[in-house]
Image (cartoon, grey):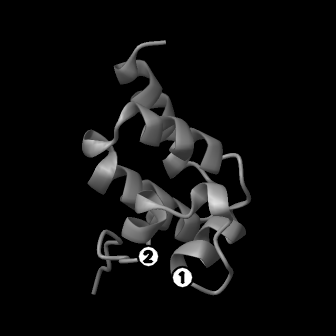
Amino acid sequence: MDRETRLKRLRFRAWHRGTKEADLMIGGFFDAHHLAFTDEQIALFEEMLEEQDVDIMAWALGTQPVPKKFDGEIIAKMKQLNFVPISR
């Protein structure tokens, strides 16, 4: 599968998690950072999306330890939370 198709599928999966909070956090992160993803980061993000939303969100919020295989640049950027849109 080519890179563009993989990213389109990832975007859909990132924005269709099941709850609005997870959609905003995971989908918002994807939209903000996917253009800079390496092929290895695409593969890791694909693998991470197989995990439970509550776990991914807890890793990003720092309320649960991040599993070693996901503890890297993607989670570090996700922890910044500066990509989540907040409407007022």
| x and y, in percent, of residue 51 in the image | 72, 54
- Residue plotted at (63% across, 55% down): 69
Mark seen at residue 52: none
The residue labelled by disc 2 is 79
Is residue 58 placed above or below 73 in the rendered structure? below
Residue beneath the point at 37% across and 67% down: 77
Give the structural element (helix, strand or loop) at label 2: loop
Q: Disc 1 marks which residue? A: 61
* Quadrant where the C terminus is found in the figure: bottom left
Secondary element type, mark 1: helix
Question: In the shown orientation, is residue 52 left or right of residue 35?
Answer: right
Left or right: 11 with respect to 84?
Answer: right
Report the residue at 54% width, 43% height from top: 44
Circle 1: residue type: Leu
Query: Within the image, what quadrant is residue 21 found in?
Result: bottom right
Percent position of residue 19, x then y = 63, 64
Where's residue 41, x and y in %? 44, 42
Residue 79 seen anywhere in this rendered image of the structure: yes
